[in-house]
Image (tube, rainbow, N blue to C red):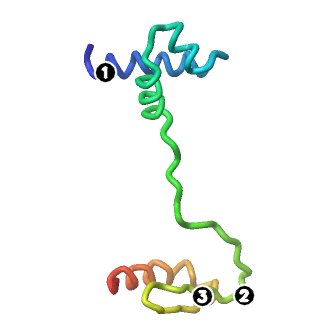
Amino acid sequence: MTKDDKRTFWQQHIQAHKEGDQSQRAYCAEHGLSKSQFSYWKSQFDPKPQVSGFVPVRIQASAMVRIDLPGGIGVSVPTEALASLLPMILRCATERG
């Protein structure tokens, strides 16, 4: 079985399982599949979303934002300038680090 054949085989089983109402264990038993292989391939087709360390926030237009950087550096900027200044601030911070 080629790599593409194997991928297609598992993709069809993962899709069939999603469309059914059986547990993963029951589906694997009925189709003679290894539960660990099924889990592996399922993770390949449905990877978990990457979690970012950033949290979205809403900022009042006339507010000041303070950004504390490693090394004890702090920068306060008006929110109107944040979008244009943030890339430069982050670039400078990573160059220093």
Residue at left 48%, top 39%? 47
Local crowd size for mark 2, using a 10 Å CA cut-off: few (<14), some (14–19), many (≥20):
few
* Residue type for callout 1: Asp
Q: Are marks 2 and 1 in contact (CB under 8 Å)?
A: no
Residue carrying label 2 = 62
Of residue 78 and residue 35, the one placed in the foreground of this image is 35
Q: CA distance from mark 3 to mark 2?
A: 13 Å
Q: Which residue is mark 3?
A: 66
Q: CA distance from mark 3 to mark 1?
A: 51 Å
Coordinates of residue 14 in the picture (x, y in percent):
51, 21
Q: Residue at x 50, y 52 (%)?
A: 50
Compared across the picture, whether 80 is left or right of 86 comes to right
- Mark 3 or 1 closer to N-term? 1
Q: Residue at x 42, y 33 (%)?
A: 44
**Quadrant where the C terminus lies?**
bottom left
Q: Position of residue 66 (x, y in %)?
A: 60, 88
Q: Are marks 3 and 2 in contact (CB under 8 Å)?
A: no
Q: Which residue is mark 1?
A: 4
Between the C-alphas of marks 2 and 1, the distance is 56 Å
Q: Is residue 12 shown left or right of residue 65?
A: left
Q: Badge 1 local density, few (<14 within 10 Å), some, or many (20+)?
A: few
Which secondary structure, mark 3? strand
Q: Amino acid at mark 2?
A: Ser
Label disc, if present, on residue 86 of the rendered structure: none
